[in-house]
Amino acid sequence: MTDYSVDLVPDLAPSSQYKFATRVLPLLLMALLLLVIPLLEPSRTSLSLLNAVGINIVFALSYNMLLGQAGMLSFGHAVYFGFGGYAAMHAMNWIETASYDGGVWAAFPVFALPLVGFAGGAAAGAVIGWPSCRRAGVPFAMISLGLAELIAAAGLMFVGLFGGEEGITGDRMNGVEAFGLSLGPIGEVYWFIAFWAFAGTALMYAFTRTPLGKLAQAVRDNPERVQFVGYNPNKVRYLVFIAAGGFAGLAGGMSAVNYEIFTPESLSVIPSGLVLLMAYIGGARYFAGPILGAIMLTYMQSNFSDYSEAWLLYLGLLFIGMIMFAPRGLAGLLLSAVSGIQHSLTVKSLLRWGAYCTAGLLVVVGGVTLIELAVRRSNGFGEVFEPFGLHLSPEQVLPWMYGGVLLAAGVGLLTALHKVGEGESK
Amino acid sequence: MTAALQLKDVCKSFGPANVIEGVSLEVKRGERHAIIGPNGAGKSTLFNLISGLFPSTSGQILLSGRQICGLKPFEINRLGLSRSFQVSNIFANMSVRENVRCAVLWSLGYGHSFWRNIGNLKEVQRKTAEVLDKVGLSDKADVPAVLLTYADQRTLEIAITIAGGADVILLDEPTAGMSHSETNRAIELIEMASEGKTLLIVEHDMGVVFGLSDRISVLVYGEIIATGTPEEIRGDARVREAYLGDEADFAEVTA
Ligand SMILES: Nc1ncnc2c1ncn2[C@@H]1O[C@H](COP(=O)(O)OP(=O)(O)OP(=O)(O)O)[C@@H](O)[C@H]1O
Ligand SMILES: [Mg+2]
């Protein structure tokens, strides 16, 4: 028999260069980016958008601990975001009281409130996960939905805890200052958000590399077999659920400090659905997918909602489109584009890419025209759709035809490209 | 010395269908014991009962003298019993190395730890590499399990089963569907992996069964009709009867 002393065993682990490039480098780049952004002197609007993005990155990554890593589909993840946020919000008020009357909270910096959020989210996860993690698959998803509805309703009932419809408010400029940040101006809040977004991302990435993180992936792949290598899949799910609740609570704590207000709406099914979309559209199979999804959806939410009343409709269409045509999400699209450039960069493939993009653009332009016309017509105020200085009235036939023709041309081109592609692969 | 595994009058019914009807069986420590029998005899069901996947309807199952009826599969696994599946049951989206790594974690005492980087656990790396080397999958360590050939998936199935270092190993038709040369390699692997352990194996290939086992039990319609050494089984009239129609075949392959 072979003697398996350490140096005789072939080292199967990836090379340290590979490890650095795939594990450490992305995090370093993220840190660098976070440090560079303030040098570009972003406007107040951009800063508040960036802060919202930072919160949603942590929230979406925490959601993906469940969906992408452990294969648990939850419709109620905002509950843990909410519990964390409320815990942080109450603590913020205790800090304020203590800064006048004294007490233990006087020594607690507002900067560290996301830790209180983490504790709140994890505690909620530990209590709610206990019954719900005994089920997997569809029953788990249904229980999470039911609980989300129940807790959102409770949020309006228990006014002392959740502050009723107005929620509870606080003031972040109290107590001890950490890192010399008063957290007054939005530029200082940026550093707070950047710090926690980075810490949350790094910790959640580290989690994927632990024994429990690996077991979570095994449970996602094959819960039955996990039982026969000595693990209880329900217990693995439960522990991951607590961790995911904790990180959602961390994001809630970030949100509490950023907005200084927390309302029961933030633990309802609407943000729960939105975080699902972020993870899915970004690409639940990849660690970085939810980051892309969070950036894109937060941007859409803050910008499109100004331009169009139909933005939720666009969001829905985007979601359906991704499920049907790019189930690996934005991250998957990006990766296949990169590998396409590396391996098969020919004139032909470039032409095909160009054709696909043209077709996609036609579909989008045609679809948007039709939707915007329809919205204006149904509003009945005689409003006119005026993109890029054009004058498209919903009362005339021609604009509808433009939209219809563009959409039809796009769909036709896509179908043709698809047929050509199929013919070649035969 | 207590038997490694002992079944006392174990029964299992699915609704009205009595699939296992009073099986008693003793597998001695260090023994290689084969279970043979026609399709649908209840061999896999018996494995499912022993490993805790299904509860038995009645009877007792003892692992090293300890009652294991009613325990969950992972509890039985932690007591040192590991099984493979007739249909490959692996972690399809994970690499071969990750598959084996998941299977060694519990035995090395890492439980549910979430404060350690798995890449820094030298023992885990070493044990994983050792198992992969043993089964000959080292060169495919980074291949996603789903992309392996059928025979390699069967090998990985065995690798996962033995990785935790269990003392009692149950293999359900490990060579099913393999070519002749693949079967020979699998047998070598099984002989090596079961050295110093207790092996209970279900196998259809009579050549394999009679070459490998110390004792054989014949299961027909949920009942064990004979247990004995290969010689005793070869000469057993009831066994020949059970394989009636194939009698000539049976004589031929067991000769
Ligand atoms: N979960 C179940 N529910 C109902 N019936 C079952 C179940 N599992 C097995 N059976 C039945 O029990 C009988 C024995 O099946 P089992 O798979 O144990 O046979 P086997 O001896 O392993 O056969 P093979 O050689 O084909 O693998 C079959 O008739 C099967 O239909
Ligand atoms: Mg079987």
Image: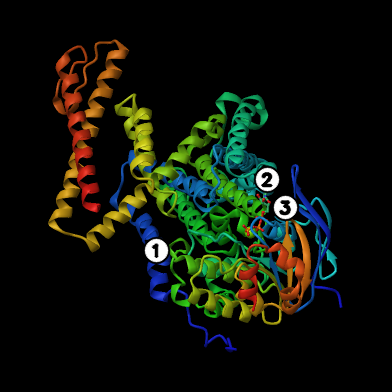
- Identify the chain of the residue marked 2, using the numbered disc in the image: A
What residue is at 65 percent from the left and 50 percent from the top? A238
Which is more toward the observer, B16 or B91? B16
Q: Amino acid at mark 1?
A: Leu
Classify the position of the C terminus of chain B by image quarter. bottom right
Q: Quadrant of ligand 2?
A: bottom right
Which residue has dot 3 on it?
A: B54
Q: Residue at label 1?
A: A28
Whole-percent x, y for residue A298 in the image: 39, 39
Pointer 2 local density, CA inside 10 Å: few below 14, some 14–19, many at least 20: some
Q: Secondary structure at mark 2?
A: loop
Residue tagged 2: A134
Disc 3 versus disc 2: distance between alpha carbons? 18 Å
Q: Marks 1 and 2, Cα distance to the nearest angstrom?
A: 39 Å
Q: Are marks 3 and 2 in contact (CB under 8 Å)?
A: no
Q: Mark 3 belongs to which amino acid? A: Phe
Going by the numbered disc 2, the residue's amino acid type is Arg
On-image quarter of the N terminus of chain B: bottom right
Q: Nearer the viewer, residue B77 or A424?
A: A424
| Mark positioned earlier in the residue sequence (1 or 2) | 1
Question: On the same chain: label 1 and label 2?
Answer: yes
Q: Callout 1: residue from which chain?
A: A
